[in-house]
Amino acid sequence: MTSRRLQGLVQSDIRRMTRECERVQGINLGQGICDLPTPPLVRDGAIAAIREQKSTYSFPEGTRELREAIARKLARDNGIAADPATEICVTTGASGAFTCAVHALLDPGDGLLLLEPYYGYHLNAAIVAGLMPQFLTLHPPAFAIDEAALEAAMTPQTRAIVICTPSNPSGKMFGEAELQAVARVARKHGVFIITDEIYEYIRYDGRPHLSPACFAPERTVSIMGLSKTFSITGWRLGYATGPKELIAPMTLVNDLFYVCAPTPLQWGAAAGFAAPKSYFDDLQSSYQEKRDLICATLTAAGLPPIVPQGAYYVLADCSRLGLPTAREAALALLERTGVASVPGNSFYRGATGEKLLRFCFAKEDDVLAEACRRLRKA
């Protein structure tokens, strides 16, 4: 028998569609694998660390060199002043940082407010931690936060709000007015803000990334990562920053659960933070071209997209396929075209998700072009 906290939980449709895609030897636009090449600066930094025998445990909070590099990046790109000694913790992926946050700051039975559509990991990790998921539905295509609706979603049990910006799966980037509203509600109710900013460098049309911590620094844990920026999803490196009284217990949990993030890979990531501004500019322009291609393709295929502002996913309306569930639509599209997507019910509780599919466009240009060629025949 499994523990009660796992009852009802199954492998996500994201993983399931990856397996189905492998079965038909298709093109996987489902899981956010990001199979683009790792920048040489990052790759060579890790290789050098391995050759230099930098392979023992690091401190639970991460190597000093990486934390100092992160602190410089936070000041430069996020407007966040963080003491690398006490206000930064390097984790086993951004997902590891999220796990540390919910276990260190919340108790079983506490409410965790998620914005719908949500990232399934946030929901399921909260359930495993014994938390009570709560929801505020944001409506397409704007996915705007309404302060009155956010206020109404709060309950006496609510202890934290999760903000994912740029959002997975919608690509929504929250603006200043929305984040100010979140800060006001969080202060009024005395709750934490836990962010997921893993896609901060992948944004479009000149939009700036705004970190929620800039509006409520005293109660915000900012979770960021390196997987998407440097195309190293398998390295499992992320980090969290916030007030030392929040980061200290998270570091304790990080030690208990994970001991530390992979040491030689931390050295590679530290080298990556020295990348020139042109790297990040090229990253954005490259992804914008991919976004525009997939959105034009989906439009032509009769699967109208909700054009994302950031991240590398797009939600598309699959109503034309005429199937009762998003899972059936995703499987039918895979069988018909050999292109995998993710059913929208992975990100919604109700009927809205049954009309949507999520596509990931973090692919090499030739692979994405072939996927688009196939989708146009859908």
Image (cartoon, helix red, strand yellow):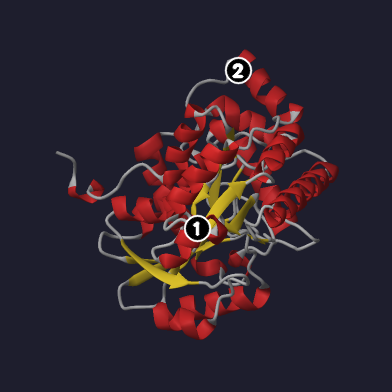
Secondary structure of the residue carrying tag 2 is: helix
Specify whether 236 is left or right of 285: left
| Furthest residue toward right | 278
Specify whether 327 is left or right of 157: right
35 over 135 or under it: above or below: above
**Residue at (60, 60) in percent of width and height:** 165
Q: Which residue is mark 1?
A: 322
**On residue 134, which mark appears?**
none
Spot occupied by residue 202 in the image (x, y as percentages of width and height): 70, 51
Q: Which residue is mark 2?
A: 50
Front in this rendered view, residue 72 or 367: 367
Looking at the image, tell me whether mark 1 or mark 2 is earlier in sequence order. 2
The N terminus lies in which quarter of the figure?
A: top left
Secondary structure of the residue carrying tag 1 is: loop
Report, in whole angstroms, how far the alpha carbon at label 1 lies from the one at label 2.
Answer: 53 Å
Image marks 1 and 2: residues in contact by CB distance under 8 Å: no
Spot occupied by residue 305 in the image (x, y as percentages of width and height): 65, 59
